[in-house]
Amino acid sequence: MSANRLDALPVGRRVAYWRGRRKLSQQVFADRLGKSKSWVDKVERGVRTLDKVTTLHEIAAVLRIDTAVLLARDGQPTETSERGEGVEQVRAALSRYEVPLDRPAAHRSILPVDQVARQVAHAWTTFQHARYPQLTDLLPDLLAEAERTHSDAPIAGRVPLVETYRITAALLVKLGDPDLAWLAVDRAMNAATGDPVLVAAAAVQLGQVLRACGQARVAKSAMLAAAYRVAPPVIEFGLPPALSLCGTLLVQAALAAASQGDARTADDLLDEAAVLAAHVNDGHDHYRTGFGATAVDLARTAVAVELGDVRNAVTWHETAVRRDGWRRLATEHRAAHLVDTARAYLHADDPINAGRLLIDVDRIAPAEMRQRPAARDLLAQIARDPRTPTTITELAVTLGLG
């Protein structure tokens, strides 16, 4: 049988194939495993699932093959090279400087502002649906179009330009390149200068980038400065968009405080954000923040994970996912939260629940699992635990991590 055909078979059929290759009857094979012949028959027919890594190791040892052969490691693609190529495409786009250098490309036909704005909205939707490979394909052209339009219409074209840089920074943090993300968010902040609301929107990504670069103290200071510039004098009279921006920046400041180990400040800031969230209905997405009561609960989970408070992390997670607003959040937001919570379960020495959440992530947002380095690293840690279910081991092998 060819390798490709063998890789396409269910794991039970692969066990049967290799048992036949080793000229072992079901009974002899069962005896060597310490199992019954009926157990072997059910495994090979797919009636019984191989749900423990230790059992797979035992079967592989008896069959004198590597465990990865049973899981079809060689037949599964990985997407790390695709992620790297996508980042390099974005890096190249950020390095062209077509408008400042007055290169020929800067004089191509310039799109109207409303058309660029529609492209920006599509790019945000693509990010929020966790379609990262598609977004890396979109961004190089979008960056060029937004920059050319802004040079032609500096006032009207400023918002699409800032939003394009925001998306770029958010994606690059997700894909594990905070240094390049810093370049994008720095351009966003400079382009937004003079408009406190636009600066606050760009500052959301600034907070993410600074924390990813290990600059938690600077992040907290910047987030608070940006938040209080747009905070309404009286919360009850504040409009949801401004409350969402202010609340999201407080959440970013809280996450930065947690990175410094400052639990009290993190809790105080999240309490402050919760007061604002009470005036913003879940399900709205002002300035692409997804801010609301559910988002604050998710942030409490992330803060607890950062502080090593596993019990509270799981409690806040369970509270958040029971809210009506949970399903209204962007796919990317939910997937990122599940990765955070999986880390909490792993720290609690519960690889089964940690693995279950990562399977959910792979189901709702495959690119989050396949292209985000933080998620891949977590999966690799979980897969090494002998108690981990086979489904996790199979996913790890699929991604080249087994």
Image (cartoon, rainbow, N blue to C red):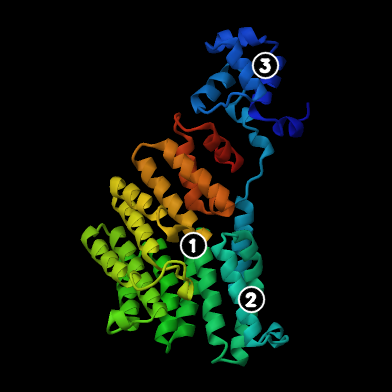
Is residue 285 placed above or below 196 in the rendered structure?
above
Does dot 3 land on a helix, a strand or a loop?
helix
Checking the image for residue 328, the label placed there is 1
Of the image marks 3 and 1, the number of the one nearer the N terminus: 3
Residue 336, how many percent across, how many down? Answer: 46, 56
Q: Which residue is drawn at 70% across and 11% down?
A: 23
How many other residues sit within 10 Å of disc 3, few (<14), some (14-19) or many (≥20)?
A: many
Is residue 172 placed above or below 361 in the rendered structure?
below
Does dot 2 land on a helix, a strand or a loop?
helix
Q: Residue furthest right?
A: 1
Q: Do the residues labelled 3 and 2 touch (CB within 8 Å)?
A: no
Is residue 301 placed above or below 221 in the rendered structure?
above
Direction from residue 376 to residue 2 in the image, left or right: right
Q: Distance between the residues labelled 3 and 2?
A: 56 Å
Does dot 1 land on a helix, a strand or a loop?
helix
Q: What residue type is labelled 2?
A: Gln
Residues 270 and 164: in front is 270
Checking the image for residue 119, the label placed there is 2
Disc 3 designates what residue?
Answer: 19
Q: Which residue is drawn at 54% across and 12% down?
A: 35
Residue 315, how many percent across, how many down? Answer: 32, 49
Of the image marks 1 and 2, the number of the one nearer the N terminus: 2
Mark 3, mark 1: which one is toward the viewer?
1
Q: Which residue is drawn at 62% across and 7% down?
A: 28
Residues 133 and 105: in front is 133
Pick the quarter of the image with the C terminus: top right
How many other residues sit within 10 Å of disc 1, few (<14), some (14-19) or many (≥20)?
A: some
> In the rendered image, which quarter is residue 128 located in?
bottom right
Mark 3, mark 2: which one is toward the viewer?
2
Direction from residue 19 to residue 256 in the image, left or right: left
